[in-house]
Amino acid sequence: MNDAPERRPGFRADIQGLRAIAVLLVLAYHARPDLVPGGFVGVDVFFVISGFLIAQPLAVEAARTGRVRLAAFWGRRIRRLMPAAALVIVVALGLGLWLSSVTRWESQLWQAFASATSWQNWFLADRAVDYLHASDPAGPLQHFWSLSVEEQFYVAVPLLLALLAVLVPRRLLGAWRIVLVAAFAVSLAWSIGETALDPDIAYFSTATRAWEFLLGAGVAAFAGRLAPGPRLGQVLGGAGVVIVLASGFVIGPDWAFPSWTALVPTLGAALAILGGIRAGAAGPVTRALGLPPLRYVGDISYSLYLWHWPVIWVTLAALRDRNAWVPPLWVPVVIAVSLACAVLSYELVERPFLGRPVRIVPRLRLPVWRRPTLRGTAVLGGALLALVGVAIAAALAVKPLAEARYAADTDPRNFAGARIYDPDFDASAWRLGPVAPIPDPATLEHRERQLTPACMSVYADPGITTCDWGSDDPGAPLVLLLGDSHAAQWAPAFDDFGKVHGWRVVLAAKQACPITTASRFAKDGEGDWYDECVAWNAAIMRMVLAERPALVVTAAFDDSAPGWAGDGYAESQIAGYAELIRCVEAADPVTRDCATQGTAVEASWARLAATRVPGVVQVDPAPYVCPGGVCPAIIGNVRTYRDDSHLSIPYVQSLEWLLEPAVRQAAPGLF
C-alpha cells in the first residue's frame, strides 16, 4: 500500500488496479464487515505487492554494484511515506482526543507514538493478548499496524541484501533466491503454528506476516523462469483477480488467519502480478486493471488507506454507534469523505515530496522537492517525527487539565451505582443526568492491581500468586479471596471491608480458572484442557489447609460447556465446585463458612454447587447488575463493566451494601 511505482519504464498500470481492489476491499470491510466479511485480506494483497516492487530492484542493484545504498533507499521511503503519515497521525490524534473520554487518552497517545515509530503492530499484539485489554475499542490510528509491518520489512530486507553482498558478492542473486525460499517456508510454518497457538499475536506479528512479502519478492526473483506468455498470463492474471475478490466475500473473521488461509488471497495476488509480467497492456485483464479510474484509486491507495479508518472512527464516535458498523445511510458519506481526504493528501502532500507538480489546483504553486539530498531527507524525517512528538507533548500537557475538569464535573454523590437499589439509600441528592459514567479517569485505561500478573497467575503458570489487601496487621483475621479474575474483581470491596473491620485479605486468583477439584477443565473454549488450572487448584487446597482462614470467598465466571468437552462436563464442574467447598469446610471447624458468588448467569455452576453444601452463604448480584435480564452499560451514573465481562471498581464498591450482610451472616466473628 506504500509504494506506488513512478511513471517510468516498466511501470505497470495493472498493479495499480490490483492495489485499488485491495484498498477498496479494506475500506468496505471496515465500513460494513457484514457485507464484505473478508475484506481485511486487502492488507495481505498489499503485502505481496510491496514485496514484488521493493525487494527485486534492491537485489538487482546489489548484484550490479556490489552494495546496497541503504541511505538512499531509506531516504526514498521517508519522502514517500512520512509526510502523509505524519499529517494523518496528528489530525487523527487530535480528533481522537477530542471525541474520546480522557480515560482513553493514554492508549491513543501510545498508539500515536507507536505509529510514528513503526511498532504499532507489536503494541496492538500486546494489547490483544493482554487479559484485560483484549476487548478494548479500536482507536483512530489502529490501522497503522500494517504500515508498521511494512516498514519493518523495509528495514530488514536491505540489511539482509547488504549482508549477502558482502558474503557472496558473485552469487548474490542465487543466494537471494535460496534465502527467499527458506525464509518463506519458515515464516509460513511459523504463521500456521502461531495462529493455532495464539491467533492474536499471529495476526499482528511481523514474523507471521513476513512470508506474504517474501511471496511477492519471490515472484520478482523467479519471474524470468516462471512468467507465462501473454495468453496464459491473461488467464492466470484474471484467475488471480477473481481469487482476490472472492476471498473478500468467502473468508470471514471465524477463519484461522493468517495461517495457511492467507495463502488464498496472497496466491491470488501473486498470480495477478505474475500473469501481467509478459502480457503487455493489450490483454483484456491488464486493460481492465489499468482503466484510468481504477488506476487513479491505486495511485491514491496509500493516502486512502491512511485516511479511511480515521474517517470511519470519527463517524462512529460522532454517531455513538456501538455496532462498529457504519449505518447504511452513512456509507456513501464515509466513502466520499475518505476519497476526498485521500485525493487532497495525495495531490498536496505526497506528490510535492516526490518531486511532482500539484495538479488538483492549477494555479497553486507549492514547493516541489525536485532534487532531494540525503541530508535534506534526514532533516525532513526528523522534523516530521518532531511534529508528532510536539502533538503528543501538547496532549500530555493538557491531560491533567482535562482530568481535573472531568473530576470537577463528576460529583461523587451523584454516582450511586448499585446503591440506587439499596432500600436504605437516600436518593434525595442523586439525579439521573448526562454525566460522565465513571468518576475515576484511570479506571478503564489502567489495569487494576487485582487484575494484573502481580496478583493473578497467568494462563501458563500453575503456581499461586497472591497479594494482600485490607489491614496491614499480620495478626488480623484472614480472609481468602479465591478463584478466577471474576473473583479478583471483588478485591476492592473486600479491601474496604478489611480496612474498616481489621481483616487481612489475601487474593489468590488465576486467569479463567475457578476453584474446583474437577480433574479436567476446558481452557476458554479453545478446544484444549486447562491442565495448569487443575494444578493450581491442587496448590490452592494445600494453601487453604495451611493458612486456616476465618473466611473463604470465591466467585467464578461460568461459561457454557464446550461441545468438544463431552457429555457430563457441566455436571463434573458442579461436583468439583461442591467438593472443594466441602474440603474447605472440613479443613477446620472454625472455617465453616464460605460465601459463593455466581455471576449474572442463570443457574450458574457455582450457584448450583453451593446448594449441595449446607452452610454456604450465596450472594447473587445478578438482579443488581442485569435487572430484568438486561445488563445496562451504566447504572446509577456509574459504568457497570470495565470491559466485556468484568465489573468496574466503582460498581463493585457500590455493591458493598449487598455484600456486607452476607459476610456478616457467613462469619459473624469477623465483626
Image: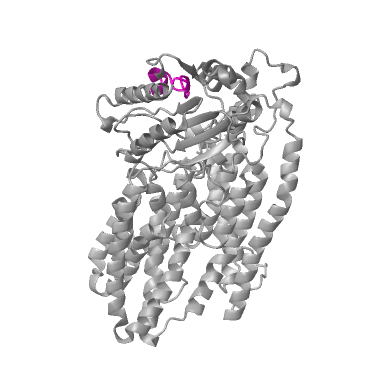
Q: Residue at x 40, y 27 (%)?
A: 558
Q: Is residue 279 visible?
A: no
**Is residue 149 found left or right of 284 in the rendered image?**
right
* Structure colour scheme: one colour
Number of residue marks: 0
Q: Residue at x 56, y 57 (%)?
A: 342
Residue 206, percent across and down? Answer: 41, 60
Residue 488 colored magenta?
A: no
**Is residue 105 found left or right of 545 in the rendered image?**
right
Quarter-of-image position of residue 583: top left
Residue 600 colored magenta?
A: yes
Q: Residue at x 65, y 61 (%)?
A: 389
Residue 67, percent across and down? Answer: 41, 84
Q: Dividing the image into 4 quarters, which one contains the C terminus?
A: top right
Quarter-of-image position of residue 572: top left
Q: Nearer the viewer, residue 472 or 81?
A: 472
Q: Nearer the viewer, residue 421 or 392?
A: 421
Residue 468, percent across and down? Answer: 56, 38
**Vertical placement of 663 versus 60: above or below?**
above
Q: Is residue 205 visible?
A: yes
**Vertical placement of 151 versus 141: above or below?**
below
Q: Nearer the viewer, residue 16 or 628?
A: 628
Residue 188, percent across and down? Answer: 30, 59
**Is residue 358 found left or right of 218 in the rendered image?**
right
Q: Nearer the viewer, residue 80 or 238?
A: 80
Q: Residue at x 59, y 58 (%)?
A: 113
**Is residue 545 found left or right of 215 in the rendered image?**
right
Q: What's the magenta region? A: 589-609
